[in-house]
Image (cartoon, rainbow, N blue to C red):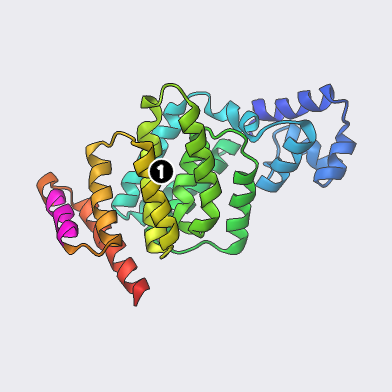
C-alpha cells in the first residue's frame, strides 16, 4: 500500500502533542495498529479516524484535505456517478467499485469514492442502507466542522440511503455555511443540486414536514436556478402536490430536450412514490 501525507500527518501531530504510539494505540486498538496506519500499511475505518482526530486535535477536514487539494477530480468523479445514476447503469457502477477496490495503491481517497459508488447504487433502488452502514456514515458526518466539497458530494450521494430526518442537521449546517460565504455564485449550483436531491429523498420517504421545510428554505435562499434545476423542481414539487398538469409539463420539457435519461428517472421516482403511498 502506498504511503501518503495523511499518515505522515498522524505521526507529526502525535509527536507535537507528545503522544506515543502506545498511548494512541490504547485509544484506537493497539500500538501495532498505529504503526501500520502511520506506515500506510492499513486504512483506518471511519470510527478509528474519528478517534485519531479527537485525540490529536485534528478536524476531519484536515485529515482528508491531502486527498482533495483540488476539487476537479472529485467533481469529475461525482459527475460520472450522476451520469450512471441517471442511466441506472448499475453494472458500470459495480465495475467502478471493483476497479477501485482492486487497485494496488488503495488510499482513503479511494475509500471515499467507494462509499460514493455504494450510495449511488442504493439511490438507483431507493432502498435504505443497513443500520450499520447508516451509523458509519452518520458518525463521519457528525465530526465535520466545516463542510468541504468532498463531504457535500458524499452526503449528496447518501441522501436516499439514510432516513431524511437524520440528514436535516447536516443540511442546516451546510446552508448556514453557504449563507456566510461571500462569493455565493461559485457554490450555488452545488447547493441547489444538494437541496433538490434532499427534496427528492423527503418526498419518496413521505416526510411531508421535511418537504415543506425544504421548499421554504428554497424560497428563503433565493438561489439562482439553472435550466436543469428548474426542471427537477417543477417535477418534484408537482409530484408532492399531486399536480398532474405540472407533472405533464415536466415530461413535455424532457421530450423537448430529448433527454430520455431524466424521463426514465422521473418514471422511477413517480413509480416509487405512488407504490409507497399504496
For image coordinates 28% across by 49% down, the residue present is 233
In the image, is residue 247 part of the stretch drawn in magenta?
A: yes
Q: Is residue 190 left or right of residue 140?
A: left
Q: Is residue 133 visible?
A: yes
At which x and y percent is residue 73?
Answer: 44, 30
For image coordinates 40% across by 26% down, the residue present is 184
Would you identify the image quadrant in which residue 126 lies?
Answer: bottom left
Looking at this view, name the residue that lies furthest to the left.
Answer: 256
Mark 1 residue element: helix
**94 lies above or below 192:** below
- Say which quadrant the N terminus sits in: top right
Circle 1 is placed at which residue position? Answer: 194
For image coordinates 23% across by 50% down, the residue present is 234
**67 lies above or below 270:** above
At which x and y percent is residue 139?
Answer: 64, 49
Q: Is residue 92 left or right of residue 15?
A: left
Between residue 98 and residue 227, name the one nearer to us.
227
At which x and y percent is residue 249?
Answer: 14, 54
Amino acid at each position: 500500500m502506498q504511503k501518503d501525507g495523511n499518515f505522515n500527518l498522524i505521526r507529526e501531530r502525535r509527536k507535537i502533542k507528545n503522544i506515543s504510539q502506545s498511548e494512541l494505540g490504547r485509544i484506537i486498538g493497539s500500538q501495532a495498529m498505529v504503526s501500520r496506519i502511520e506506515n500506510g500499511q492499513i486504512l483506518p475505518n471511519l470510527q478509528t479516524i474519528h478517534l485519531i482526530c479527537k485525540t490529536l486535535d485534528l478536524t476531519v477536514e484536515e485529515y482528508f484535505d491531502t486527498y482533495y487539494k483540488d476539487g476537479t477530480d472529485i467533481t469529475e468523479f461525482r459527475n460520472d456517478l450522476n451520469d450512471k445514476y441517471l442511466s441506472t447503469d448499475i453494472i458500470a457502477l459495480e465495475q467502478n467499485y471493483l476497479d477501485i477496490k482492486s487497485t494496488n495503491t488503495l488510499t482513503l481517497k479511494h475509500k471515499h469514492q467507494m462509499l460514493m459508488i455504494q450510495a449511488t447504487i442504493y439511490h438507483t433502488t431507493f432502498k435504505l442502507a443497513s443500520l450499520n452502514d447508516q451509523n458509519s456514515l452518520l458518525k463521519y458526518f457528525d465530526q465535520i466542522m466545516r463542510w468541504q466539497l468532498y463531504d457535500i458530494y458524499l452526503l449528496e450521494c447518501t441522501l436516499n440511503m439514510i432516513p431524511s430526518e437524520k440528514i436535516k442537521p447536516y443540511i442546516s449546517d451546510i446552508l448556514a455555511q453557504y449563507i456566510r460565504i461571500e462569493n455565493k455564485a461559485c457554490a450555488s449550483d452545488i447547493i441547489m443540486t444538494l437541496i433538490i436531491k434532499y427534496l427528492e429523498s423527503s418526498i419518496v420517504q413521505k416526510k411531508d414536514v421535511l418537504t415543506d421545510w425544504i421548499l421554504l428554505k428554497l424560497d428563503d435562499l433565493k438561489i439562482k436556478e439553472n435550466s436543469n434545476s428548474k426542471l427537477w423542481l417543477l417535477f418534484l414539487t408537482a409530484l408532492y402536490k399531486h399536480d398532474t398538469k405540472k407533472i405533464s409539463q415536466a415530461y413535455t420539457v424532457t421530450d423537448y430536450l430529448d433527454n430520455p435519461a431524466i424521463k426514465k428517472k422521473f418514471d422511477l421516482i413517480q413509480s416509487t412514490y405512488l407504490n409507497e403511498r399504496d
